[in-house]
């Protein structure tokens, strides 16, 4: 079925065209490069994976409860609107919210794919071009994954949130080569990681848990890339140029904090716009999400050298200034470690099931007791997708 038929709202024109400025940059130095970026490039090559094989797409998903998160996570839980809903309406609401969340992930990942391609074209350093090429492949894989989950498991999509679209538009229209880094790697990826992490840690469903865990393993490298590239460049900026970037960050943070919340889902269920906005603001879940949203952005902004007085005041106003001292390295290491642990658990379970299956086949064939030597194939070091 064509994607357009699955949208809860009319998404508008088939193509969104953004007039993008800026120059394509070629460099003629092919040997020298920053070792940290080249090491990240090597890691990016080594960590490529196939979504068809690493993710178990055979797992069943209830489209009316795709994520299995607590009802308390619903924005209207505990309100008269929730109390008046039938169980059927609540199931529909769970489906719509999951479709909205994963649709924003999908659209954001397409934005990341475009931005990674722009970075490859416009960044002046070859070592950064090398890594951004691996990130473009990562983002293509993420688009594939979220699209497949929505089409095959949920059966519904939502158009891109207008605030996310606005930030993407600002990011892509700017002709300065560092802006795709700042808009995508720092702000949009930071928001995505907060949302991915909340769902990864709360969902009780194995398929979305796999998806989010493996995608976050890739994203840990992407955040590291943005930090390395921008930290070096921003040391060279004038105070005026640095203030321009800080203004962009401030505007983007307020936009994402105040507008990316899913009111359009509530209005689909007949809730007035004003009531939807008020309930979203009062939602404990949304308040927690907003703090986690900045857990990746604030320390990254500080680390790359954007920490002027006005930006600090904005973060004080948002109540997230103290997050500037959080350890991004620790957060990224945890994201990678959780993916490795998930692989290890799945691998062990698959090997146990395979061993039992082979043993049963041998017994049924009259082979008697099964020895270890009778079980064919080497298992050491094999990943789930092999």
Image (cartoon, grey):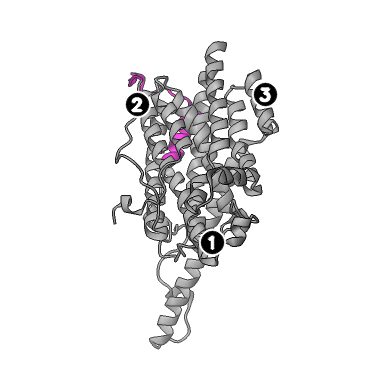
Residue at image location 59% in from the left, 56% down from the top: 81
State how many labels appear.
3
Residue 243 can be seen in this image: yes
Please tell me which residue lies in front, 208 or 379: 208
Mark closer to the observer (2, 3):
3
Q: Compute the Cα span from label 1 to label 3.
A: 41 Å
Residue 276 locus on image (x, y percent): 56, 46
SS class, disc 2: helix
Whether tag 1 and tag 3 are in contact, CB under 8 A, the answer is no
Element marked by disc 1: helix
First-in-chain label (1 vs 3): 1
Q: Between marks 2 and 3, how big is the CA–CA gap?
A: 35 Å
Q: Nearer the viewer, residue 229 or 144?
A: 144
Q: Which mark is residue 121?
A: 2
**As drawn, 84 above or below 265:** below
User: On screen, 243 above or below 61?
Assistant: above
Label number found at residue 313:
3
Q: Position of residue 98 (x, y in %)?
A: 49, 54
- Local SS, label 3: helix
CB under 8 Å between discs 2 and 3:
no
> Which residues are drawn in magenta?
22-45
- Residue under circle 1? 90
Residue 63, picture quadrant:
bottom left
Q: At 40% from the left edge and 81% from the top edge, which residue is drawn?
A: 361
Distance (Cα) linking label 1 and label 2: 47 Å
């Amino acid at each position: 079925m064509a994607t357009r038929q699955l949208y809860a709202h009319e998404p508008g024109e088939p193509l969104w065209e953004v007039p993008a400025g800026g120059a394509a940059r070629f460099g003629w130095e092919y040997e020298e490069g920053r070792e940290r970026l080249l090491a990240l490039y090597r890691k990016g090559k080594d960590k490529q994976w196939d979504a068809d094989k690493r993710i178990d797409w055979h797992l069943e998903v209830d489209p009316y409860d795709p994520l299995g998160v607590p009802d308390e996570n619903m924005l209207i839980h505990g309100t008269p609107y929730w109390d008046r809903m039938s169980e059927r309406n609540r199931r529909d609401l769970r489906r719509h919210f999951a479709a909205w969340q994963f649709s924003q992930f999908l659209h954001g990942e397409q934005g990341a794919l475009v931005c990674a391609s722009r970075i490859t074209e416009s960044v002046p350093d070859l070592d950064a071009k090398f890594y951004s090429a691996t990130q473009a492949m990562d983002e293509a894989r993420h688009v594939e994954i979220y699209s497949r989950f929505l089409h095959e498991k949920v059966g519904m999509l939502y158009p891109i949130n207008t605030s996310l679209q606005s930030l993407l538009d600002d990011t892509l229209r700017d002709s300065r080569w560092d802006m795709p880094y700042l808009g995508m790697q720092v702000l949009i990826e930071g928001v995505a990681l907060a949302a991915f992490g909340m769902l990864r840690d709360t969902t009780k469903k194995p398929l979305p848990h796999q998806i989010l865990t493996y995608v976050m393993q890739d994203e840990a490298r992407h955040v590291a890339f943005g930090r390395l590239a921008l930290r070096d460049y921003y040391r060279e900026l004038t105070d005026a140029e640095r203030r321009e970037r800080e203004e962009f960050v401030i505007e983007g943070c307020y936009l994402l904090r105040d507008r990316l919340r899913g009111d359009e889902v509530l209005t689909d269920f007949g809730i007035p716009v004003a009531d939807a906005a008020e309930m979203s603001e009062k939602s404990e879940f949304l308040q927690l999400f907003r703090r986690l949203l900045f857990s990746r952005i604030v320390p990254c902004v500080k680390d790359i050298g954007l920490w002027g007085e006005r930006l600090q005041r904005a973060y004080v106003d948002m109540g997230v200034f103290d997050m500037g001292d959080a350890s991004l390295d620790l957060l990224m290491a945890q994201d990678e470690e959780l993916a490795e642990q998930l692989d290890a658990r799945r691998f062990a379970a698959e090997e146990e099931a395979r061993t039992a299956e082979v043993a049963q086949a041998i017994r049924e064939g009259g082979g008697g007791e099964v020895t270890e030597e009778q079980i064919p194939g080497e298992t050491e070091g094999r990943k789930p997708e092999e």
